[in-house]
Amino acid sequence: MMSSVAVYMVYCIHMKTKKGIVAWMLIGAAWVAALVLYDEMSDRMATHWNAAGIADGYSGKALALFLLPVIMIAIQGTFVLIPKIDPLKKNIETFRDKYEGFILLLGAFMLYVFALTILWSKGVRFSMTTALLPALAGMFYGIGVLIKDIKRNWFVGIRTPWTMTSDVVWGRTHILGSKLFKLSGAVTLLGIAFPGAVMWFIIVPILASTAATVVYSYIVFKDEKK
């Protein structure tokens, strides 16, 4: 398994930028932590938490320690592949720096989740949901930063039947989406002050932002056709 993972990583490492290299370093850190901590972790580790942030699901330590690092590699490999297979790959190159910045942000988010999982299994007790709020807020805000100026493509962005048919609809929808996702990040962070309603501060902003951009893309599309 380890040799297969290594081969896959070597195959996927095509990002030569500093952000791309750091993103792979975060994955490496997760693997090193999993290998170093394996012997000292309990045989059963928490892998699922309820809405109140309390662990309610457990798995064997092999799965708990190595599943997330494997997922990190799979996601990273997918993001590396996208610019190579997208029919509109030239458009992705126009926002490549932001694209790789988001990959780095996503890797940092997953490493943070991995660290929280290990801390919990080490006996440190906290609300997992509340602990995730700053990271989720950062992710939502990061999405807003990413999509502001991105060009039309088949994999990244707000892809509705209407944005994919017009650069105008795509552009206007993403300008609105950028503002809404940044706002969602700010609202999510406010959930720290309301521990009893944390999930509402996560779910409502992102669902509202998503729904608003879908509806708006249709409205812009109809206006353009007039």
Image (cartoon, rainbow, N blue to C red):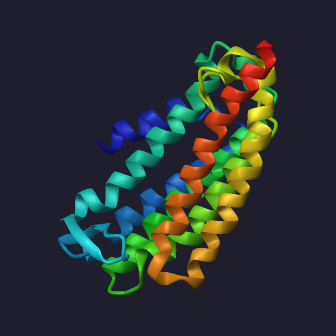
Whether residue 145 is visible here, answered yes or no, is no
In the rendered image of this protein, does residue 31 appear above or below residue 154? below
Residue drawn at x 71%, y 43% is 177
Q: Picture coordinates of residue 90 (x, y %)?
A: 76, 18
Residue drawn at x 71%, y 51% is 180
**What quarter of the picture does the C terminus occupy?**
top right
Residue drawn at x 50%, y 58% is 110
| Left or right of 145 in this view: 20 | left
In the rendered image of this protein, does residue 219 appear above or below residue 120? above
Which image quadrant is residue 20 in? top right
Q: Nearer the viewer, residue 94 or 40?
A: 94
Whether residue 161 is visible here, answered yes or no, is yes
Which image quadrant is residue 194 in? bottom right
**What quarter of the picture does the N terminus occupy?**
top left
Residue drawn at x 63%, y 49% is 209
In the rendered image of this protein, does residue 36 appear above or below residue 82? below
